[in-house]
Amino acid sequence: MDGNSPAIFSTYGERGTFDLGRALGTFLTLPFCVGLRGPLGVGKTVMVKGIADGLGISDTVTSPTYTFCREYRDGDRKLTHIDLYRIDNVDDLESIGWLDLVLEADILVVEWIERAAEYLPRDWIEVELALAGGDKRSATLCSHGADSRQILTRLKTRYVGHR
Ligand SMILES: Nc1ncnc2c1ncn2[C@@H]1O[C@H](COP(=O)(O)OP(=O)(O)OP(=O)(O)O)[C@@H](O)[C@H]1O
Ligand SMILES: [Mg+2]
């Protein structure tokens, strides 16, 4: 398995997606970005809750759909959670201060990352979630950059989940 190949997991129920997110959160180094794709209700926010838990953030993570952005802190770690569902164009992205958010965040986690397709971070992990029947989901993780490649390599070798 080389460092560039995607990591593909199956998750069963909310707990499975949470646990995969938690494993990813455990391996993230600062600064970092995770971008999530996938249809409404597939489990993107569930995975963000897991990432926050893996980072040691104990606050309750809720969907920022109507606020665009929420920040959570634990000591020196800051998680910025953005939901771009309502973003239609570059003007919308500018109005939420997207470029500054990308530059200033420690760990940036973005739902509907495809809405920022032309303004992606320098190095990030792409998570694509897909419905796979009932409570099953498939999660495909790809690296875009050297730091994210290292993180995915660690996740692939150390995370014992369903593949
Ligand atoms: N394997 C699974 N992984 C994640 N969620 C699951 C799974 N099976 C069932 N669910 C349910 O699917 C829903 C996922 O909701 P969630 O808010 O995380 O979706 P979302 O992708 O963030 O949606 P949106 O696009 O509206 O932000 C939850 O109600 C959760 O209980
Ligand atoms: Mg969501």
Image (spheres, rainbow, N blue to C red):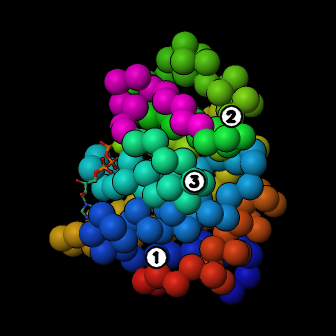
Which residue in the protein does label 2 denote?
105
Residue at 61% x, 25% y is: 98
Which of label 1 and label 2 is nearer to you?
2
| Tally of marks | 3
Question: Which one is earlier in the sequence, the residue at label 1 or at label 2?
Answer: 1
Compute the Cα span from label 3 to label 1: 23 Å
In the rendered structure, which amino acid carries the disc numbered 1?
Phe
Please determine whether, in this image, residue 70 is positioned above or below residue 127.
above
Residue 91 location, quadrant: top right
- On screen, residue 118 versus residue 136, left or right, reads right
Q: Which residues are magenta?
A: 62-73
Q: Residue at x 30, y 63 (%)?
A: 14
At label 3, counting other C-alpha atoms closer than 10 Å, the crowd grade (few under 14, some 14-19, many 20 or more) is: some
Q: Quadrant of ligand 2?
A: top left
Q: Percent position (x, y) of residue 70?
A: 49, 30
Residue position marked by numbered label 1 in the rendering:
9
Could you tell whether 109 is left or right of 76 in the image?
Answer: left
Q: Which residue is mark 3?
A: 56
Mark 1 C-beta to ligand 1 under 8 Å? no
Separation of marks 3 and 2 at Cα, in angstroms = 17 Å
> In which quadrant of the rendered image does the N terminus lie?
bottom right
Disc 1 crowd, CA 10 A, few/some/many (<14, 14-19, 20+): some
